[in-house]
Image (cartoon, rainbow, N blue to C red):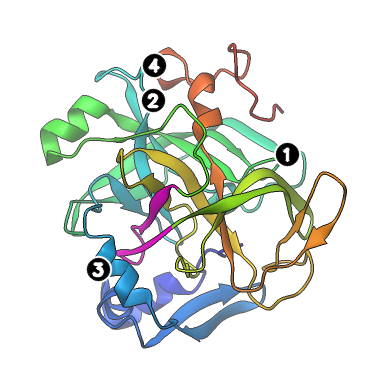
């Protein structure tokens, strides 16, 4: 997984608020902090990252958020109303309560988590707060949804920023996409290379995962970033993992398993979880209702 950056808060306190992410953004070729299972290690951003950023300028940071250890975005469904409480999308492995175990679903749990809202230029313009973890899991998918204390209308009125819309249809191979990290204030552009029937990483298995082409060299802290369809501006997936070392199906080294059980390892390739399946599960007032028609998210 693109592990949460557990040491990031300390780095910010020592260097000044925003200092660590700013260095990473403005110097794509320098050493970057990346977390692994034992702590924060360093990694040099690969060649081509800057080119990807230039290509991605059509997609902005507006509506994305920075968590303490991950990235995320304020999202809405096609049927969301201005007066509904806003939702923040991130990964299940970014929850402040820790990684949900296999088969575990977090539903409607109290939370006071805060998020830094970014404008189009990637500047933090305000703090949003949650009152609930509306949903979170690492089973079949790797997703978390937080319910905020403000409505979509209140956020737009205060900051002039609209929520990103979740696409209600499945993305297709070849779609041009941009991964937008609110944590690093950095973008990665590539395309949907294909789909993994099953993506297995350690104890977790995810279904129908998006595989990026090699240009999206996402790093730790990009966990939870929205994956945006360049043509529509809608969210089609949420960034979550990549095979770092070429190992087979271990933590930080997911493997693909096809319908026949054949395992494929793609070192250096990164993945995301599709989000169109979230749309049927969001009812009036931004309530997560797992009994709604078409909702296939895992249940507690």
- Image side of residue 262 versus residue 118, left or right: right
Find the distance from the CA under tag 4 to the CA under tag 3: 38 Å
Label whose residue precedes the other's in the sequence (2 or 4): 2
Residue beneath disc 2:
77
Q: Position of residue 13 (x, y in %)?
A: 33, 76
Circles 3, 2 touching at the beta carbon (< 8 Å): no
- Nearer to us: label 3 or label 2: 3
Q: Residue at x 79, y 55 (%)?
A: 203
Q: What mark, if any, has residue 214 been given in the picture?
A: none
* Residue identifier under label 3: 54
Front residue of this view, candidates 129 and 158: 158
Residue 159 left/right relative to 187: left
- Are the residues tagged 4 and 1 within 8 Å (C-beta)? no
Helix, strand or loop at mark 4: helix
Q: Which dot, 2 or 4, sits closer to the camera? A: 2
- Magenta residues, start to end: 175-190
Q: Image point 77% across, 45% down: which residue?
A: 102
Residue 18, position as x, y percentages in the image: 27, 71
Residue occupied by mark 1 = 104
Q: Residues within 10 Å of mark 4 (few under 14, many from 20)?
A: some
Distance (Cα) linking label 1 and label 2? 24 Å
Q: Residues within 10 Å of mark 3 (few under 14, many from 20)?
A: few
Q: Which residue is mark 4?
A: 285
Tell whether position 184 is magenta: yes
Numbered disc 2: secondary structure = loop
Most foreground residue, 125 or 233: 233
Residue 34 picture location, percent across and down: 51, 76
In three-dimensional space, the C-alpha distance between marks 3 and 1, rounded to whole angstroms, equals: 40 Å
Q: Is residue 122 part of the magenta span, yes or no?
A: no
Task: Using the numbered discs, state the Cα–Cα distance from disc 3 to disc 2 in whole angstroms.
Answer: 29 Å
Q: Earlier in the sequence, mark 3 or mark 2?
A: 3
């Amino acid at each position: 997984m693109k592990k949460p950056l557990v040491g990031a808060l300390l780095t910010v306190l020592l260097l000044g608020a925003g200092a660590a992410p700013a260095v990473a953004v403005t110097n794509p070729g320098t050493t970057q902090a990346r977390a692994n299972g034992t702590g924060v290690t360093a990694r040099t951003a690969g060649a081509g990252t800057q080119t990807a950023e230039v290509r991605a300028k059509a997609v902005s940071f507006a509506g994305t958020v920075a968590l303490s250890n991950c990235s995320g975005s304020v999202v809405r469904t096609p049927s969301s109303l201005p007066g509904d409480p806003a939702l923040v999308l991130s990964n299940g492995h970014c929850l402040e309560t820790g990684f949900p175990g296999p088969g575990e679903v977090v539903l409607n749990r109290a939370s006071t988590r805060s998020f830094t809202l970014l404008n189009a230029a990637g500047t933090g313009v305000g703090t949003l707060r949650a009152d609930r973890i509306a949903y979170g899991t690492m089973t079949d998918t790797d997703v978390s949804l937080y319910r905020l204390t403000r409505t979509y209308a209140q956020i737009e009125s205060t900051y002039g920023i609209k929520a990103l819309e979740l696409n209600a249809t499945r993305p297709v191979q070849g779609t041009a996409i941009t991964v937008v990290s609110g944590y690093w204030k950095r973008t990665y552009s590539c395309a949907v290379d294909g789909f993994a029937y099953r993506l297995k990483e350690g104890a977790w298995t995810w279904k129908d995962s998006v595989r990026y082409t090699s240009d999206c060299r996402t790093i730790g802290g990009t966990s939870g970033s929205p994956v945006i369809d360049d043509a529509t501006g809608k969210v089609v997936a949420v960034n979550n993992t990549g095979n770092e070392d070429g190992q087979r199906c271990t933590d930080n080294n997911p493997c693909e398993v096809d319908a026949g059980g054949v395992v494929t390892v793609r070192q250096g390739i990164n993945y995301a979880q599709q989000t169109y399946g979230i749309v049927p599960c969001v009812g009036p007032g931004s309530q997560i209702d797992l009994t709604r028609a078409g909702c296939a998210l895992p249940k507690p």
